[in-house]
Image: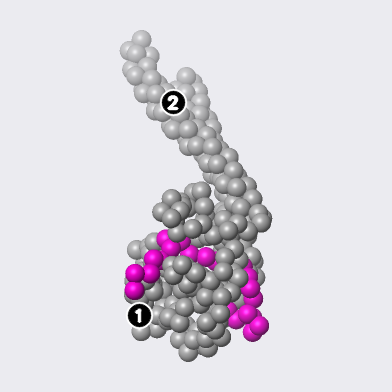
Amino acid sequence: MTGLSSRRPAVAGFAIFTLLMVTAFSGLGIWQLQRRIEKHALIARLNERLAAAPETLPVSAQWPSLTPARDEFRRVSFAATYAPLPDAMVYSAGSAVRDDISGPGTWAFLPVQLAGGSIVVVNAGFVQNTMQDRQQQDRAVRRLITGDPVELIGYIRFPESAGALTPPESLEKRLWFTRDHLAMARALGWGEGARAVAPFYIDLESPMPESGIPKPGPLSVRLKDDHMQYAITWFTLALAVVIAFGVWWRGKRG
């Protein structure tokens, strides 16, 4: 009788622990399934934006109301003139949104001026620039600065934040490692003379320069989607805890 009484607290304690673990693992599995639904909805929205006909670039009065959730990857068209100001390089080891880009190089970030005087920063395209050579970048972008307005088509993007391990920018080379066009504008004087700089930048789709450099192009969404795999892992762990409790309990009964 005493042995039976002593086993009851142990069984109850292990049962409560098992219930808590199953609840936690199952909750994480359900959360991953919900994340999967949200991710698929996001991919569908982004693909819809990328495939849409270009809209007119929002006027400067609307810029403060634009947000990444609502406006990232919106396809726009506008006329602007490449400003005779220094460009910036952004190092890249490839692209998560360009199927035609691979290997190390740099993105050419340049300011363009709208008819009203405001500045919009554009990523004019990829330059195969393994050594982050400033002269190579200069040669690539010099032909773009003609003083004539150009019809541009591209996608609204928002600046990135540097991570803890991101190298600092090199002002000597005008080289950045994050797509933070606002930091570039402050460092390179793109907003001087009371010129307003848009809070977003434009990834150019077209036009393609005659030389093909820098190389703009269409974007495609390839978001990582491992949520089903993670959900299965959490549900498997929940089942494993139940099985472990069952084996332990049968051993206790025997």
* Magenta highlight range: 193-214
Check contact, mark 1 vs mark 2: CB within 8 A. Answer: no
Asked if residue 93 shows in the view, the reply is: no
Disc 1 marks which residue? 171
Quadrant where the N terminus lies?
A: top left
Is the residue marked by circle 1 packed among few (<14), some (14-19), or many (20+) residues within 10 Å?
Answer: few
Asked if residue 224 shows in the view, the reply is: yes
Residue 146 placement: quadrant = bottom right
* Residue 99 relative to residue 235: left or right: right
Task: Tell me what residue is drawn at x 57 percent, y 56 percent.
Answer: 74
Observer-side mark, 1 or 2, equals: 1
Task: Tell me what residue is drawn at x 46 percent, y 67 percent.
Answer: 116
Q: Earlier in the sequence, mark 1 or mark 2?
A: 2
Residue 217 placement: quadrant = bottom right
Residue 126 percent location from the top left of the image? 56, 75
Q: State the SS at label 1.
A: loop
Question: Does residue 201 show up magenta in the picture?
Answer: yes
